[in-house]
Image (cartoon, helix red, strand yellow):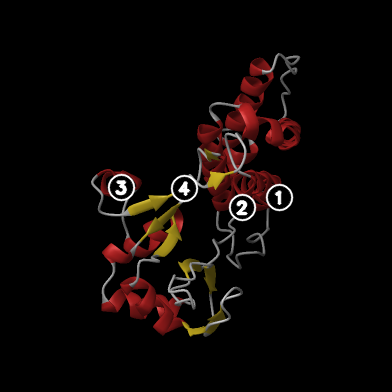
Amino acid sequence: MSQCVICHRQQDDERMACRICRVRMDDRLVDILEFFALAEGELQPGRSGSGRSGEQGIGLRIDALDFVTGHDVVAILASWESDIRETYGLTIAPMLSRPGPLLGRSVTFLRSWLPRTCETFTPVDDMNREIHECWTTARSAARCSPRTGWRVSCPADLPNGDLCGTWLVVHSQTDQVTCRRCHTAWEIDWLMRVAAAAKSGIWVDREALLERFGISDRTLKRWVQHGRIARRGEMYDVRALMGVSDLASMSDMA
C-alpha cells in the first residue's frame, strides 16, 4: 500500500502517482497540443476566437503570441523531457528551433513515459503541477473557456449508515443529478445545501474557486496553510467559505 503523491489516494502498489492522476496528466498534454493549434489561429489576420469559446479576436493576442513562439509552456515541457531523459540515462534529444515541432516532440515523449514516471520519478508531483499550469496558460491563449462545474461528494445515507460519498459532477444548465452508486436523484439547490451541512463536502478545482470567490493564488495558499480550507489533491472543499447566498448562486450556475 502507498499514497499517491499528487492526490493522496491510497493505492495497492508502490507507484509514486496513481492511475487517475496519470490519465489526467495525459489528457492535459493532449489538450495542450490542441490549444497550440487554436492559439496559432488566433494570430491569423481576420480570424476570430477559437470557436470553442465563442469570443471574438481583437487586436494582437499577446498570450497567444507567447505560447506559439515557445515562451513558458513549450520551454517548461521541453525542460521536463530533458529531466526525464537525464534521470533514466536516455539519449539527449537535439533542441529544435521551431516551437511547434518541439512541443509536439516533448508532449509525445512525456505521454509515452508517463507510466514509468508515475512509478518511479520522484518529482512527478512537481511535473503534474507544472503540466496543469501549462494547460491553464495554453487554454487561455487558445481562448477556450473553462468548463463550469462542481464536484460534490454524494451526501446520501446508505443502508449501513455510511455516507455514499460518490463524486457527483454538477455541470452548467443542470437541474438534477443522479448518483450512479446509490441512485439518489438530487435537485441541485438541495444537493448543495445538504452537502454543505454534511461531512462529504463541496469540492471544486483551483480555477473554479479563484473565479467564484475572487481570491488570488497567494491567498488560497495561505488559507490552506492556516486550515481555513481543506485540500485533497487538486480539489478544495469550499463549505467553510459559503453562506446561503453562495449556495443560491451555485445552484444558479449549475
Kind of residue sitting beneath label 3: Val
Is residue 54 visible from the viewing direction of this image?
yes
Secondary structure under the numbered disc 2 in the rendered image: loop
How far, Cα to Cα, is label 1 from label 2? Answer: 9 Å
Would you name the residue on which mark 4 appears?
233
Depth check, mark 2 against mark 3: the one in front is: 3
Q: Mark 1 or mark 3: name the one nearer the start of the chain.
A: 1
Q: Residue at x 30, y 54 (%)?
A: 229
Kind of residue sitting beneath label 4: Gly
Q: Mark 1 or mark 4: name the one nearer the start of the chain.
A: 1
The image quadrant that residue 215 belongs to is bottom left
Kind of residue sitting beneath label 2: Ala
Secondary structure under the numbered disc 3 in the rendered image: helix
The image quadrant that residue 18 belongs to is top right
Percent across and percent down for residue 223 are 27, 49
Would you name the residue on which mark 2 appears?
142
Tell me: residue 248, above or below residue 114: below
Placement of the N terminus among the 4 image quadrants: top right
Q: Residue at x 32, y 66 (%)?
A: 239
How far, Cα to Cα, is label 2 from label 3? Answer: 31 Å
Percent across and percent down for residue 210 are 38, 56
Q: Which mark is residue 224?
A: 3
- Depth order, front residue of 87/210: 87
How far, Cα to Cα, is label 4 from label 3? Answer: 12 Å
Is residue 70 visible from the viewing direction of this image?
no
- Depth order, front residue of 232/183: 183
Percent across and percent down for residue 126 are 50, 33
Would you name the residue on which mark 1 appears?
34
